[in-house]
Structure formats: structure tokens, C-alpha cells
Image (cartoon, coloured by chain):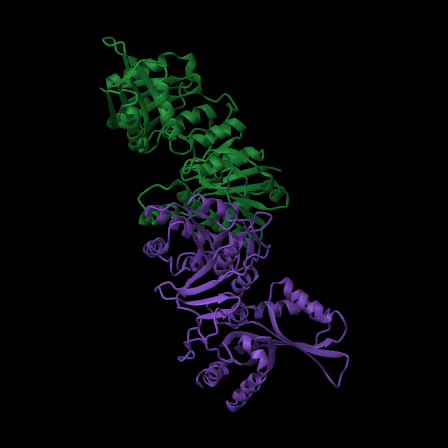
Chain colours: A purple, B green
């Protein structure tokens, strides 16, 4: 007996026909006594159509009402999927995020899963149902509907898998696994059989689009093996898990990731006194803005002030501008500069800690290609360089060729 | 200060433009300190489109999942309406049926409102919001989404008005009030200024399509004055209330109602013993089938058996056939006859009790027009004749002419 959570995205459930294909595939793959939870997204373009309806009514982002609106997309999918399973002769029951016990923070459009009360899901499984849960959504403690933001269905799937102690969470997608780099940029990129949560997290945060970082975090927290695989074939994809299951040939690095959706923010002349930097980042956090690669540089000539540079997602740059404008006078900030045309390139690999030469190689490759590095940040398992957006692809190809094509 | 519930149907909220018109109308009509709850239906054809999606997946009526699906229609409307109010500068908040505290029976597709826990609605009003509630839906005690059946938004509106003790419930519709008969059938039909709950209930049950009978019952139970009026004009419509506010000119009858959606069911040879009729009607009730005009006739020649005739909505006739087939052998029923081409014509009026001549006049008119009456049933305030469907319009016109055109 296995207990599996399977997540299907919007393109997999875009039409009733495609839903019926999934039903056939799921039923064919089930052994007796297997228990299956499906997490599904909204059908095809539904979410975009709902957003477009909202745009006809207002140009403002009314968070609560937008979530009320968008959450209907998945609700339609789960109801139809449950009907499709019943039509195929298998008991099935659908649950909205709220009904599945998914409790989120009160951050509309960007809710975070705080807790899952999975009793209803477990009971329904015990009763022999295939359980179909709406991805991307939950409910606050106050009973307001929230959504988890784009890609939130991955997070739902992994979180539900954790809550019901599933044997694995399968993420069905339009690629057949995780690659050492984006194959559209690096044609030689190879599919990985396995990758650790930590490595995947670095890859995902850096834009390797396949998995939501929050979903990977969830997987790590609850130790749920995540199998990223293709909707269109039966071949094994990539397992994201705690460690490696065997000593296969290991490269020095695991992958080369890139992110072109980056804006660099520089705040000039922040008084170099306790509390000022805190105020800035607390204000950004209050607006749910993720900040990365923070560098603070004290000016030699003027000890009273400091310059702070950090990166944010380009989507947030307008919001950052507004938030900082609000506190600019209060904090006596001299100037705020935002450069939206930035990108990040990273090498990722749990084994790199013992190989100090990797950073040197990376910087050397950048230099050989005439690419200027604006900021460097490192973690236990990654090295990231902030560079101009226009140089990102060239850098990724050169680095990938250096580390992977040697043998 | 007035506390008003306003209900707008699907055609009134069919497009974002129409929603904005409603917003303008509601805001224009509000006095300071007025509190307003809007109950809205799904946009235009949304419900039909959702049903059509379900039909592509299954031909069976999966009650729970169908309600999961259909309830999204209103959820889309309420979210957009709340945004439209906010855009127009007024605080607004939307609630699904469940969030508005509407608890229903577990009868999917035909849920009945058992209770409304209106605390959230009241709080949101206190906070200065226009509150927008999804019509047509609720939630069971177990947390399953239900719908109330077609026209259920009227019921939602009146029930919410009762629960929050509103001063009135306004039902906006595409006609400008309740008429003495269907104007499409009887061009001389007149708009009524007032009608009692009891009279309206008889009119509504008999197919005078404007108001759901259950909504009228709710109004009567909670003594909520219901104002049926036009979406497209400001003129006063018809007030449905406990009694008449003044002694205006009263006709002997208030209206002539018709219903062409009737099937006659005859069960031949039911053993004339205690418990048999009960078994039949209990079985029908268990399937949520509304039964009307019951006649039991004991055969003179054979005292052991009886024939039972009753009417149901034509939509239920296939279900009735199945249900009776199940118990046919057990109850030793001789035969089951269903005639789907029947109709009802009724005269309605609280004042008719003191005028026994009304029934005689009605039968005389039928006879003069060569119309055969199959069953007659009477209540305190109505007389109903079951006749062939093809004669319904003729009968209604003749009766209306007799009672209304005299003076």
C-alpha cells in the first residue's frame, strides 16, 4: 500500500478531455490498497480570464476580493475531476483549500500555509475515495479565502503530503525533470536523477522555474520525497529528497541556475545608526517583499551614513519604490536608485563546500567573458553573482561548459 | 437609518458594466447611515456554462460535486461586485454562502436553509461595509457546499433579511412587479401594489415565476416585507407583506395563476390497508419530490384496493417513475400511469373565503369553454383545477376576464 499525492497543473487539466486522460492514468497506475490525493490547479487560462474580469471592474489590487475570485478557478477543476473519477467508476470527493483544512496567513494573494488540519482528507481516504484538493488556496483563521500566489499548487501538494505523511509527492509538469541548467539556454543540460532539497531550493530560488521554492522548503521540513516528472510520459523524472540514494558519479557542482527577473535597489545615505536598516527591511517585509543579496557599505569619507544595496524580484520593484518613498524623509535617505535590468547566475552543489576552487573558477569565467560582477553572495551550497541581465545567458553557458563538459 | 437587503439576479450582473450600473444605483439610493446587504446570483449564463462543462465529463448528476461546481458562479459575482463598490469609493466585503453563515440541509442541488449565523454579516455592516452575499448557496453542518436550486438567490435574500432583521428585502427583477396574471398570457393583467405572503405563495407555487415560493415562505416566517421591483426603473413595484396597508379597491380575487409544468401520476390498485399510502409518499419525500393535489379513490367494486392520483413537477416525473418502480412489487401495485401533459389554473385571493360563488363561477367558465377538470383542490385562499396543458392559457384568459374586467 502506498499513499501518494499527485499534483497536476493548469495545462494538464485544461479541458474535460485532458481531465479524463489524467483519470485513466491515475487509475491505471494504482495498485489495490493504494491511496491517492490529487492536487489540481485551475483549468488552462481560467486564472488569467478571472484576472481580466477583475481588470474590467477595477485597476486596484483588492487582495481579499481577488482571492475570493481566483479561488473559484481551482474549485471548478476539483469538482469536474471528482465527477470524472466517479464517471470512471471510482469513488472520489473534492475539497476546497478550506475544506482540506489548509490554514494560511492573512497575506492575500501570497498566503503562507501555517497549518493543515487533514482529518477530512484522511477520513475520505479511509472511506476509499480518491481525494481531490484545490491547489493554490487556503483559508485564514478568520474564515477568509486566500491564495498562495502563482505556483502555489506545488506548495499545496507538498504540504498536504506532509500533513498526511504520504510516501511521496509527485509533481506532474511539462518537463521531464530537473536539469543541470535551463535546456532552453544550455542545450547540453542534463536531467538529474536526484537532487537534495537544499540544492533544489537554491536552484528554484534562482529561477529554475520548475518548482516553487516554498514547495521545496515544505518538502524538506516534512521530509516528503518530491518526484518531478512529465505529464506526458511514464519515464522517471527527478527525485528531490534529503540525500543521495547511491554514490553515482558526482560532479563538483549540481547545476547552474539563472534568474533574469531581478531588480537592484540602492539606498544612498542611510544614517549609520542602530535601527535604520531594521526600519527599512521591516517595512519591506510588512509588504511581503522578498529581499535578497543585501550589501551594506560604509562610506570612508563620511562616517555618518551608509549605502545599502539589495535585490528584489522585478515584479516587486514598483512596490519597493512606493514603500521606500513613504519612509524616505523619516529616515533622511539621500537617494533611491533602482536598476531593473539585472540578473543572477549561480552554481549550486552540496559538495562544493570542500572545493574552494569553484568560486575562483566562476569568477575567472566571468572575467574571461568580460562580465562585470556587481554583488557576490554565497551559501553552504551555492555561489551567486549579480550581473547585467544581458550577460546572464552567456555566463550560464560558459559556466555549464566549464563544470559539466570536462569529462 | 434603514437596513435593506437587495437581491440582483444573473441578468442584472451579467457583465462588469452592468455591475457598475448596480453599484451606482445602490450608492445613489443610499442615505447616510443606511446599511445595505446585496445578494447576487451568478453572472448571466455562467451557471449554464458550468453545467455544460460538467456534461462533458459525466451524464450523471453527482449532487455534491455539482454544487461544488455551481457555487463558483456566485462566488465570481460577489468578488467582482465587492471590487466594483471599492472602486466607486465605498467599503465592501463579499461572503460566500458558507461565510455568511447560511446552514442548509444536506440535500444537494436542493438545499434548504436551516439556519443563518449572521454574526459576520452584522459585524461587516457595523464596520461600514456594503456586504455582498452569494445567493443560491450555503453549507451543511459537515462543511459541504450546497446549492438551493434554481431561483435560490431569492430565498437567500429573504432569509438573510430575516436573520439580520432588515427593514425590507428588495428583489430586483426584469418585470416591474407581481401581476394579476402572467402578462404574456393575459395582456390585460394589472400590476398589484400589494399582496399578502399567503396569496403570493399560492401564486408562486402555481408558477407565477417571479418569486420562489420558498422565498415567500421565508418572508412570511420572519415577517420581512418583500419589494418586487424592476432592475431597470425607479418605479415602485409590488410589496409582499402580512396584510394590506389600506383599504384600496379589492377585487374578489387577487390573481389568476397557471402552471404548465405538471405531470399527473396515477397509482392503480394500491392495497387499501394502513401504511401503504404512507410508504409511497415517504419514499417520494426521501427523494425530495414535491407532491401536490393528492386524491385517493376507493373502488366500489373491489374494496380491497384503492387508486391514488397526485401531481408532481414535470421535471420530477422520470424520478417518480424510478422511485415507484422500486416499490411496485413490494406494495403489490397494479399499474402506474403518468400523464405529463397537464397544467394547473388557480384563482387566488385572501378575500375569497367569504364568497362561495367564486368556485361555482370558475367551474362554470371551464364548462363554457369545454375544458374538462381532472382534479380540484382548494385552500383558504385559492381554488386550483388540474386540466389538460393545452387548455391552460384559454382558461386563464377566460377567468381573468370574468373576475377583473367586470368593473
Is residue A176 found left or right of B164 in the rendered image? left
Residue in the foreground of this view, choosing between B115 and B257: B115
- Is residue A279 something that shows in the picture? yes
Horizontal and vertical percent position of residue A210: 46, 68
Residue at the limit of the structure toward the front, as seen here: A247
Can you say whether A375 is above or below B261 in the image?
below
Can you say whether A81 is above or below B104 in the image?
below
Horizontal and vertical percent position of residue A369: 50, 89
Horizontal and vertical percent position of residue A58: 51, 57
Can you say whether A44 is above or below A256 in the image?
above
Picture residue at 53% right of the left edge, 76% below the top: A348
Picture residue at 36% right of the left edge, 27% below the top: B284
- Total marks in image: 0
Can you say whether B202 is above or below B357 in the image?
below
- Is residue B49 something that shows in the picture? no
Picture residue at 58% right of the left edge, 33% below the top: B165
Residue in the foreground of this view, choosing between A314 and B141: B141
Quadrant assignment, res A332: bottom right
Horizontal and vertical percent position of residue A206: 52, 73
Q: Quadrant of the C terminus of chain A?
A: bottom left
Residue in the foreground of this view, choosing between B93 and A180: A180
Amino acid at each position: 500500500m502506498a499513499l501518494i499525492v499527485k499534483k497536476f497543473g493548469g495545462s494538464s487539466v485544461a479541458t474535460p478531455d485532458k481531465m479524463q486522460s489524467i483519470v485513466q492514468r491515475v487509475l491505471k497506475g494504482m495498485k489495490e490498497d493504494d491511496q491517492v490525493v490529487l492536487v489540481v490547479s485551475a483549468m488552462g487560462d481560467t486564472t488569467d480570464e478571472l484576472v481580466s474580469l477583475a481588470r474590467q471592474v477595477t485597476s486596484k489590487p483588492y487582495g481579499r476580493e481577488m482571492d475570493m475570485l481566483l479561488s473559484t478557478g481551482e474549485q471548478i477543476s476539483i469538482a469536474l475531476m471528482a465527477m470524472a473519477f466517479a464517471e470512471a467508476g471510482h469513488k472520489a470527493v473534492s475539497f476546497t483549500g478550506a475544506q482540506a483544512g489548509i490554514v494560511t496567513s492573512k497575506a492575500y494573494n501570497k498566503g503562507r500555509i501555517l497549518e493543515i488540519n487533514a482529518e477530512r482528507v484522511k477520513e475520505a481516504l479511509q472511506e476509499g475515495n480518491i481525494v481531490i484538493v484545490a491547489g493554490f488556496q487556503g483559508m485564514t483563521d478568520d474564515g477568509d479565502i486566500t491564495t498562495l500566489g502563482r505556483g502555489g499548487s506545488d506548495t499545496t501538494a507538498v504540504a498536504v503530503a506532509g500533513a498526511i505523511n504520504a510516501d511521496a509527492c509527485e509533481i506532474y509538469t511539462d518537463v521531464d525533470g530537473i536539469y543541470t541548467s535551463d535546456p532552453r539556454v544550455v542545450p547540453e543540460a542534463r536531467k538529474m536523477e536526484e537532487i537534495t532539497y537544499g540544492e533544489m531550493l537554491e536552484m528554484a530560488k534562482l529561477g529554475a522555474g520548475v518548482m516553487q521554492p516554498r514547495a521545496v522548503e515544505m518538502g524538506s521540513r516534512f521530509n516528503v520525497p518530491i518526484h518531478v516528472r512529465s505529464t506526458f510520459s511514464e519515464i522517471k523524472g527527478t527525485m528531490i529528497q534529503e540525500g543521495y540514494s547511491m554514490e553515482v558519479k558526482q560532479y563538483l557542482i549540481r547545476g547552474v541556475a539563472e534568474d533574469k527577473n531581478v531588480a537592484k535597489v540602492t539606498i544612498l545615505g542611510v544614517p549609520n545608526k542602530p535601527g535604520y536598516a531594521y526600519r527599512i527591511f521591516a517595512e519591506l517585509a510588512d509588504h511581503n517583499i522578498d529581499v535578497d543579496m543585501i550589501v551594506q557599505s560604509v562610506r570612508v569619507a563620511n562616517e555618518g551614513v551608509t549605502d545599502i544595496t539589495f535585490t528584489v524580484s522585478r515584479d516587486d520593484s514598483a512596490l519597493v519604490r512606493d514603500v521606500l518613498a513613504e519612509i524616505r524623509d523619516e529616515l533622511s535617505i539621500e537617494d533611491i536608485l533602482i536598476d531593473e535590468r539585472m540578473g543572477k547566475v549561480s552554481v549550486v552543489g552540496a559538495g562544493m563546500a570542500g572545493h574552494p576552487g569553484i568560486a575562483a573558477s566562476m569568477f575567472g569565467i566571468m572575467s574571461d567573458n568580460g562580465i562585470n560582477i556587481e554583488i557576490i553572495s554565497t551559501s553552504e551550497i551555492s555561489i551567486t553573482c549579480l550581473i547585467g541581465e544581458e550577460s546572464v545567458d552567456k555566463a550560464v553557458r560558459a559556466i555549464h561548459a566549464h563544470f559539466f563538459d570536462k569529462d
